[in-house]
Image (cartoon, rainbow, N blue to C red):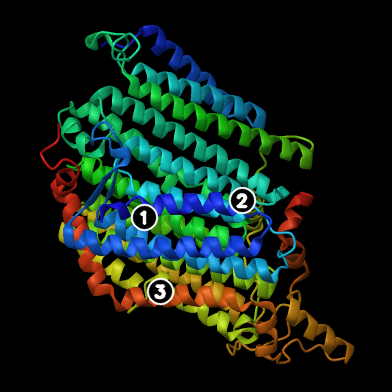
Amino acid sequence: MTWLVPLPVVMPLLGAALTLMLVARPRAQRWVSLTVLSATVAVAATLLFLSSVDGPMVVEVGGWVAPLGIVLVADQLAALMLVVSAAVTLCVLVYSIGQGTADGNEETPLSVYHPTYLVLTAGVCNAFLSGDLFNLYVGFEILLVASYVLLTLGSTETRIRAGTTYVVVSLLSSLIFLVAIGLVYAATGTLNLAQLVDRLDALPDDLRLVLQGMLLLAFGIKAAVFPLSAWLPDSYPTAPAPVTAVFAGLLTKVGVYAIIRTETLLFPGGRTADLLLVVAALTMVVGILGAVAQSDVKRLLSFTLISHIGYMLFGVGLSTSLGLSAAIFYVVHHITIQTTLFLAAGLVERRGGSTALDRLGGLARLSPLLAVLFFVPALNLAGIPPFSGFLGKLGLVQAGVDDGGPLAWTLVAGGLLTSLLTLYAIARVWNLAFWRAPHPDMPDAGDTVRAARTDGAEQPDREPSPEASSGAVLPRLMIGSTAALVVLGLALTVVAGPLFDISTDAADDLLRRTPYVEAVFPGGAP
Amino acid sequence: MNPNLTYVLVVGVLFAAGVTLLLERSLTRVLMGVILLGNGANLLLLTGGRAGGPPIVGTTAEGDMSDPLPQAMVLTAIVITLGMTAFLLALAYRSWHLNGHDEVQDDVEDRRIMELADRDEGPGTADNDNGDGDGDGDPVTVPADDRTASPAGDAGRGR
């Protein structure tokens, strides 16, 4: 069954080519994208099942034997990431199709959207599956180049401005990664991850530390870890809602995945563990303080995104089985929830005409369904029991307490504080955008105000009928796909037990390192 | 094999010049910086492999062959850098088209929040509820000052 492994990369790439040829036929384009991504979800789920039963699955691309050729490895961690990201990309695709249809893009479609979106998916999958450092770089480049195009879609003034920062920062991180690859190759003579395990162990400690630092720096920028995170809230919010959602869900997590992979497989022993913990604490606290200061829903969510990256680093920094497994669980949870929240923010923007908190209001009454779609993932993000956010944080706190060091205790405190402040930030959005009286500038509320004013009475609180307003402005596909993600987020709570088992298995495999190496080199590394 | 000192020096100079240019505001100079950095990185990759004759069986004795892998990687990296250069050029051109210059702009929203902080007004704290806690539609009266400060576009007017 190893022929399944390359499919999550190959199918979206072929799909991208096909959709590019079908530019003149948007309907066919949509069906191709939907089919490809659904198939990717199915393949990813199969891979997860097979890898948890039989151990890591390895494919030597082009039939070249391992150290010579490139390998793709689907172990439990990679397969789990694949499943979640494929499911999320599928939901976001449906959402964007709904938005495109509603906005009348039927006649003048943004022809590059579908091919680029599929290329992005292929890049993400390639990064997850890669068993080779240079192939990981190529995967990153594929997804980054696609993301540049998606971020500057339509090339309006704000998007060009935001895109410039994003592109330059990403280019810089890619260059650092490339330089790190050059140094690793010069030092060891290989880039195969499994082969690097032994060869890096044989290097002098100082040299290893330099290599590790370079890789951490490159991945840290991509994952938006605190001192390297300033680019994110500047660039993400300007993109179209579905694009922001998929970026927020996936791109930073690919960076986190790369950190997890390299820290456990290539550089175990925790020489940077303290650094990771300090950075994790700063990321959490500084990120969430930024969120508290924001007055725009999308920017606020971008800051919570940065802040919660800290939780994942916390688990990686502890590098115990429980810590890692909670971190993996948290990645899965956060991909789903953050994407859902950004999709909900997109709906808020459609319904309220803005995402600025001081121009929103009364959405809970204007559109109760939207309120539920925002409220549930918001509480989930803040970590209210019994949602998956709570379970993930519980696991991390437990791991921190088990560790017992002063730094770990600081992190536990920081994590709880961040959780509380997340709740505060989210509650502010809820109060201002959903609970208070509708703002006069808002589309429908404004209509009622104007209608009321012509009657001579300035009463903005006349009850508009929710069904009439929400049905017209919010297309069913967009509501449906957001609801599907909300349900997926809730499902994570329901299946938390089995999911935690999988992440614990994955964490144990990561810490033992041998399953990965033996899967790539059954007879021992050359 | 010891790395060739000339290569190392050239890589250093390329990186230094690239970083300097990268810190400029003009996108065209940033682009130049990226190109220099890219070339520096490529040269560094190349330096990492063994030097020697062409790695073709039959042409060169096995011991004298150069390492073909860094060369293959450099080719890939060159292609990627080429694509990115084209994209950045397009961005710079579009920016010039829209604004008449290609300077990288400050984050508008950031500046707006800093102004709010300077005037000691928390963002979005304009609570239009009258505090009776019912959360129902109390008449919305946005203070005039708030109204002018709120739309994001206003920051562009240089308030």
Indicate which disc, 3 or 1, sits on the residue closer to the N terminus. 1
> What residue is shown with label 2?
A21
Does residue B80 appear left or right of residue B89 in this picture? Answer: left
For residue A420, which quarter of the picture? bottom left
Q: Position of residue A169 (x, y in %)?
A: 52, 39
Spatial distance from mark 3 to mark 1, Cα to Cα? 23 Å
> Looking at the image, which is closer to me, A170 or A471?
A471
In the depicted structure, whether residue A254 falls above or below residue B120: above
Chain bearing tag 3 is A
Q: Position of residue A278 (x, y in %)?
A: 31, 48
Query: Sequence-wise, which precedes: disc 2 or disc 1?
Result: 2
Could you confirm whether marks 3 and 1 are on the same chain?
A: yes
Question: On the rendered image, what quadrant is the C terminus of chain A found in?
Answer: top left
Spatial CA distance of label 2 from label 1 is 42 Å
Q: Nearer the viewer, mark 3 or mark 2?
A: 2
Give the residue displayed 74% in from the left and 59% down from the top. A108
In percent of width and height, residue A399 lies at 20, 61
**Residue drawn where x is 28% and y is 62% of the image:** A48
Q: Is residue A96 left or right of residue B57?
A: right
Residue marked by disc 3? A488
Q: Chain of mark 1?
A: A
Q: Could you classify mark 3 by the number of other residues whose Cα lies within 10 Å: few (under 14), some (14-19), or many (20 or more)? A: some
Q: Are marks 3 and 1 in contact (CB under 8 Å)?
A: no
Q: Residue furthest left?
A: A523
Kindly identify the amino acid type of the residue bearing the numbered disc 2: Met
Q: Secondary structure at mark 2?
A: helix
Looking at the image, residue B56 lies above or below residue B132: above
Q: CA separation, marks 3 and 2?
A: 33 Å
The chain that hosts pointer 2 is: A
Give percent across and percent down for residue A429.
Answer: 55, 72
